[in-house]
Amino acid sequence: MDQNFNGKVALITGGTSGIGLAISKELAKLGCKICISYSQSDKKAAITKKELEQFTNEVLLIKSDISNEQAVIELFTKIKNQYQKLDYLINNAGIDLPQAFEDFSFKDWKKIIDINLNGKFLAIKNAIPLLKNSEDARVINISSRLSQKPLLEASAYCCSQAGIEMLTKVAALELCKYNIKVNTISPGFTKTPLTEGIYINKEFWEKSAAANPSKRVGDPIDIANTVVFLLSSKSNYINGVSIHVNGGSHLG
């Protein structure tokens, strides 16, 4: 990679597990100052901090509810007090609570939309003043293949992911005047603690791998590598798009 990432400040929401953790590690290895927001386990956050400190001594973990406006304001205030700028926002935090459409709890529907979609809006909105202080700011929203493909018992999740793609486009259009580029990465079926908690049958994973043209499911590093590319100077003319990283699963 030709770009020097040393001294760049990156915020990864949901950065203590799965795809978010893989992204955090790769950016730490490249010399970024790492900020991570997390919502639940303090123990997991402490483990993550220790892992990342193998690569950088600049690790800031902040417990925050990304769906709560005041919490998000406080999150960015802490980053401002620490670094006065933000170069990269990786909007990764997300959840799913699978339920049949006709039985879907509105409480759960709202929670999914609040975290997956509204949380990304709040993060971008509150990051703008800090991103303006960067010479080449980037926002990457992590979405899903389900932004374009419906799945049984995932109605709220699918709708939130579709919303992320349009959020990316409108944000890219409005923020380009500040030299802030906004893109989406939409992973295919990827093995993470979230998906492994939903799909616990080993045979299911074997069938999923066999059905993919690349004969495997996604790995978080696949997404992390794409993030690094989009943050690099090699992606300077890419803005407002969704890159699908799925091994060709959309071909069938």
Image (spheres, helix red, strand yellow):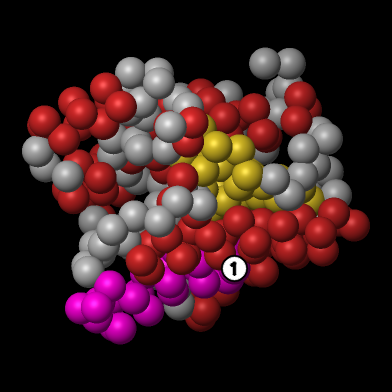
The residue where tag 1 is placed is 121
Main SS category, magenta section: helix
Q: Nearer the viewer, residue 172 or 2?
A: 172
Inspect this view and state whether residue 239 appears. yes
Please tell me in which quadrant of the rendered image residue 25 appears: top left
Inspect this view and state whether residue 61 appears. no
Q: Is residue 183 left or right of residue 194?
A: right
Above or below, comparing residue 70 to residue 196 in the picture: below
Q: Position of residue 197 (x, y in %)?
A: 17, 48
State how many labels appear. Answer: 1
Residue at (34, 76) in percent of width and height: 109
Q: Position of residue 75 (x, y in %)?
A: 52, 66
Q: Quadrant of the N terminus?
A: top right
Q: Magenta includes 61? A: no
Q: Amino acid at mark 1?
A: Phe
Highlighted magenta segment, given as a residue range: 101-124
Q: Is residue 5 left or right of residue 215?
A: right
| Helix, strand or loop status at disc 1 | helix
Q: Nearer the viewer, residue 251 or 65?
A: 251
Q: Magenta includes 122? A: yes
Looking at this rendering, what residue extends furthest in the right direction? 177
- Tell me if mark 1 has few (under 14), some (14-19) or many (20+) residues whose alpha carbon lies within 10 angstroms of its own: many
Please tell me in which quadrant of the rendered image residue 98 appears: bottom left
Q: Position of residue 169 (x, y in %)?
A: 72, 57
Above or below, comparing residue 210 to residue 251 in the picture: above
Residue at (45, 25) in percent of width and height: 247
Residue at (43, 32) in percent of width and height: 252
Residue at (22, 69) in percent of width and height: 100
Q: Position of residue 216 (x, y in %)?
A: 32, 22
